[in-house]
């Protein structure tokens, strides 16, 4: 028989081992968001399918990945920057050679037993590469280093936009820009870049695909095509508005269960949540997201090296970008793009990538006393 006196000691050692290099406040916030996500996915797909169980497994895998990455010190993560970036770019090139085309877009590679989307890898590989680059040249940073970083960023962005996948290209580009910003990009340069982007907008418009231009025009007047391009926005805004102050209650969303909301368990899950929990529920959800962003920025502020600070800042602001773009899209203030709502939307790849990024944040926080300045 086991010694009853020794059992508590074994339990505490096991708990200490499991929580090693885990940032508990960040973990609790994410678990709360995941519970909201499971409840909302169940409501959106409660008609007897297995998506809730599949999402539960996705979250379990994501948390396991988060724990594993959190155990790796940031200086070891730096060593992965160059090979991961190179692998990501090579896979993007392979997409054009042997990629799978679905609905006019060539974005996937088949590995026989599974399909992968290489652009997802760049969401972490690009900021990792840029953070490594700036850390390497920290002592002698000059304008040419920012130009070189811009070129490192433009290569994968051009390949992703060519697929075409403008939404992912924007998200990957934002993650890369945040690293450049936290590495000391002057405000004057940001102002010049903003002016150039504004001046180039008419040229960019002419290079957009027809469906991309239609999405932007639909944002201005969704009623111009209520059963076509404007259908998503119209139905999602009706669902959000019908939730009122306190919502219709869990499993009682009529827009959801009468299947008016398209893609209700993935990109438009915020409309489902809003209809059932109303303004009060949205306030709680926004509070949780605010805590997530605040904790991430606190980790970035306490980071001891340029690499850690740039990575933590980029990951945190990337979370903000996902949240802002998804909620803006569902609310009708931004064009419709394929952006999931972090930790709520259904999807295996997205949840694993998000949890991997969380693992990097936790590694930066819990290893900061071991990193040489």
Image: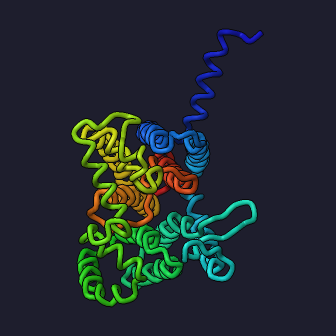
In the image, residue 264 above or below residue 22: below
Q: Tell me the residue at 57%/47% (across/down).
A: 62
Q: Tell me the residue at 44%/64% (across/down).
A: 338
Instruction: Tell me where residue 81 appears, x and y as whole percent.
Output: 57, 67
Q: Nearer the viewer, residue 355 or 225?
A: 225
Quadrant housing the C terminus = bottom left
Instruction: Please say which color scheme the image uses.
Output: rainbow
Instruction: Tell me where residue 185 appears, x and y as whole percent.
Output: 32, 74
Instruction: Tell me where residue 280 appears, x and y as whole percent.
Output: 25, 38
Q: Nearer the viewer, residue 312 or 34?
A: 34
Instruction: Tell me where residue 3 appears, x and y as whole percent.
Output: 71, 10
* Residue 318 visible here: yes
Q: Quadrant of residue 273?
A: top left
Q: Is residue 110 left or right of residue 273?
A: right
Quadrant housing the N terminus = top right
In the image, residue 329 above or below residue 243: below
Q: Tell me the residue at 35%/79% (across/down).
A: 213
Q: Quadrant of residue 329?
A: bottom left
In the image, residue 194 above or below residue 71: below
């Amino acid at each position: 028989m086991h010694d009853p006196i020794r059992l508590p000691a074994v339990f505490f050692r096991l708990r200490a081992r499991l929580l090693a290099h885990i940032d508990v406040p960040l973990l609790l916030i994410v678990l709360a968001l995941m519970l909201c996500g499971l409840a909302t996915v169940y409501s959106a797909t409660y008609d007897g399918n297995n998506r809730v169980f599949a999402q539960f497994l996705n979250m379990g895998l994501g948390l396991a990945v988060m724990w594993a990455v959190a155990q790796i010190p940031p200086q070891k993560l730096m060593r992965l920057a160059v090979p991961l970036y190179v692998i990501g770019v090579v896979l993007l090139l392979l997409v054009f050679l042997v990629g799978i085309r679905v609905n006019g877009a060539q974005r996937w590679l088949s590995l026989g037993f599974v399909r992968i989307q290489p652009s997802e890898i760049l969401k972490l590989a690009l900021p990792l590469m840029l953070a490594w680059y700036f850390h390497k040249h920290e002592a002698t940073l000059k304008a040419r280093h920012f130009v070189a970083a811009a070129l490192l960023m433009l290569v994968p962005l051009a390949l992703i936009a060519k697929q075409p996948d403008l939404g992912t290209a924007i998200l990957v580009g934002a993650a890369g820009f945040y690293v450049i910003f936290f590495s000391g990009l002057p405000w004057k340069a940001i102002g010049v870049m903003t002016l150039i982007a504004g001046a180039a907008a008419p040229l960019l418009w002419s290079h957009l695909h027809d469906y991309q231009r239609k999405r932007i025009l639909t944002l201005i007047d969704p009623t111009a095509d209520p059963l076509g391009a404007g259908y998503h926005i119209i139905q999602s805004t009706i669902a959000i508005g019908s939730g009122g102050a306190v919502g219709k209650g869990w499993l009682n969303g009529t827009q959801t269960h009468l299947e008016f909301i398209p893609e209700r368990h993935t990109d438009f899950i915020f409309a489902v949540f809003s209809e059932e929990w109303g303004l009060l529920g949205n306030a709680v959800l926004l509070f949780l997201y605010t805590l997530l962003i605040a904790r991430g920025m606190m980790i970035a502020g306490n980071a001891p090296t340029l690499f850690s600070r740039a990575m933590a800042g980029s990951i945190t602001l990337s979370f903000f970008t996902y949240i802002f773009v998804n909620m803006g899209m569902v609310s009708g203030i931004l064009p419709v793009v394929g952006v999931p709502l972090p930790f709520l939307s259904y999807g295996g790849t997205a949840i694993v990538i998000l949890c991997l990024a969380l693992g990097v944040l936790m590694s930066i926080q819990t290893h900061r006393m071991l990193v040489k300045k």
